[in-house]
Amino acid sequence: MAEWTFLTNHALVLIFLAKHPQITARELSMLIGITERAVRKIIADLETEGYIEKAKEGRRIRYSINSKLPFRHHAQRDKAIGRLLCALGWKP
């Protein structure tokens, strides 16, 4: 039986980007345990929906979080994702 977790890979990527704004997709993939390609797809999803923005800094990318956006699930749309990030140790 496969193990399950409380947070999706999208949530994990968002949490790591919030706490480590210059982390690479390769580093994220090793920390989360998914492929680098999957991480890049998740980052693209988050950027397309406005949850993150990317800014080039030299050879690296810095991610910023739009913490005021709501959760995507209909039962949680009245709560901003910043609440989850703060609960997990993010300091905006």
Image (cartoon, rainbow, N blue to C red):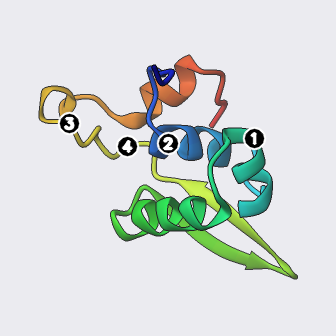
- The nearer-to-camera label among 2 and 4 is 2
Left or right placement of residue 40 versus residue 28 in this view? left
Mark 3 to mark 4: distance in Å? 15 Å
Q: Residue at x 48, y 59 (%)?
A: 42
**Can residue 80 be seen here?**
yes
Left or right placement of residue 36 versus residue 49 in this view? right
**Where is mark 3, residue-wise?**
73
- The nearer-to-camera label among 4 and 1 is 1
**Where is mark 4, residue-wise?**
68
Type of amino acid at the residue the image marks with label 3:
His
Q: Please, what secondary structure does the residue beneath circle 1 have? A: helix
Local crowd size for mark 1, using a 10 Å CA cut-off: few (<14), some (14–19), many (≥20): few
Q: Earlier in the sequence, mark 1 or mark 3?
A: 1
Closer-to-camera residue (64/73): 73
Q: Which numbered circle lies on residue 62?
A: none
**Where is mark 1, residue-wise?**
31
Q: Which numbered circle lies on residue 9?
A: 2
Mark 2 to mark 4: distance in Å? 20 Å
